[in-house]
Image: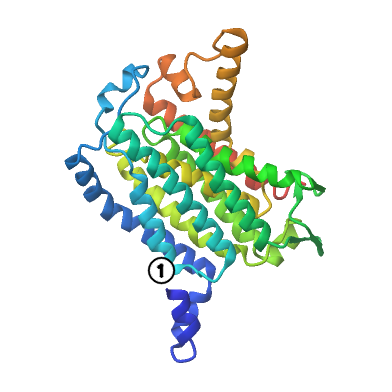
Amino acid sequence: MFYYLFDLFVNSFNFLNIFQYITLRSALAGIASFFIIIILTPKFIDFLNEKNYGENISSYLKGHKKKKGTPNMGGIAIGISILISSTLFGNFENINFIMVLGTYMLFAFSGFIDDFIKLKKGRGLSISKKVSLQTLIALTIIFFFLMNVEGFVYNDQIYKNTFIGLPFTKELFDLGSMYYFLCFLIILGSANAVNLTDGLDGLATGSLLSTVGAIVLLTYIAGNAIYTNYLYLPYVKDVAEISILLSAILGSLLGFLWFNSNPAQIFMGDVGSIPLGATIGIVSILIKQEVLLLISGGIFVIEALSVIIQILSFRFYNKRVLRMAPLHHHFEQLGYSESKIVIRFWIVSIILALIALASLKIR
């Protein structure tokens, strides 16, 4: 809204000129999102308590029995704060902005369906139905990306989307049509990796803060020709506008952590974790930092790998590598307190985000 006020009335009101700057609108989006969720969440918690929309705790998690009945679906409040902030400060004529916001909303819808069915029937969608729905959404997004994003500039040359770079190198590699399969894996993998990490109070929320923080900076750089030239990074036209949406996510996460930290008053649920994961996935694709996401979002990668390794080990060797998967539950079984596990995971997430940013100059 403020961007359009600048665009329409800047000649009459010069002070509106400040709203052309992405940095200012990003900061305002983050601040607005934080206060919206701080105001909205207590009322939302009361509403969920009145409706008895509480979390059902798995019988395997004996130490979590006291959490039974804690309101779920806090991701709805996160989504509302992001949507309002994006509407206030974003530019809806920017195709990259629309693509990322659309990704968030579509995956939030899929998460909402799963959460709602889970609250009504005690268990959500079957894995096959959940994956099918997510696959349909991911393919729709990739098709939209294919039709609307033409390529990027690197070292004063234009490249097709199918080229990718690797951290710590200056080389680009053409994956051809396999690139779009990689995009599919990134979007679905990110969505479900964050969902798997959301198992302890504040774990996914706090870990996302450092990951999204790094991606905000990478996105702003990717949309600035001067910075990308200096750092030997791909330049993607108009992609910096996404920084506003990412800043809104940062503000909402910070506000949500106020209520989600131990002991959690509310959980984000699939309606929160799945779209947040999918969003960092699509942004990494748009800013041409697909591989760097493995570092900046390393906590989520590790959590997802722990589940995969556990499943494969049990299926082929009838042995469990971990006492319980995902990894955070393994540490719980070893006797570590929930708060200690969460804070240590946050620390690792911050370190990985810093390594990802440091890679920009180590080439």
Q: At x 63% / y 51%, what residue is drawn?
A: 142
Q: Is residue 214 visible?
A: yes
Q: Could you say which is closer to the camera, residue 343 or residue 93?
A: 93
* Quarter residue 87 falls in: bottom left
Q: Is residue 346 visible?
A: no
Q: Position of residue 120 (x, y in %)?
A: 28, 35
Q: Position of residue 222 (x, y in %)?
A: 66, 59
Q: Could you say which is closer to the camera, residue 44 or residue 109?
A: 109
Looking at the picture, the colour scheme in use is: rainbow
Residue furthest to the bottom = 12
Identify the residue position indicated by label 1 in the image: 88
53 relative position to 244: left or right: left
Badge 1 local density, few (<14 within 10 Å), some, or many (20+)?
some
Residue furthest to the top = 318
> What's the amino acid at mark 1?
Leu
Q: Could you say which is closer to the camera, residue 25 or residue 4?
A: 4
Q: Position of residue 359 (x, y in %)?
A: 69, 45
Q: At x 48% / y 36%, what residue is drawn?
A: 130
- For residue 231, above or below residue 130: below
Q: Position of residue 238 (x, y in %)?
A: 63, 67
How many marks can you see? Answer: 1
Q: Could you say whether the residue bearing mark 1 is in a helix, strand or loop?
A: helix
- For residue 64, above or below residue 189: above
Please state, as top left, top right, bottom left or bottom right, where the N terminus lies in the image: bottom left
Q: At x 34% / y 37%, what residue is drawn?
A: 117
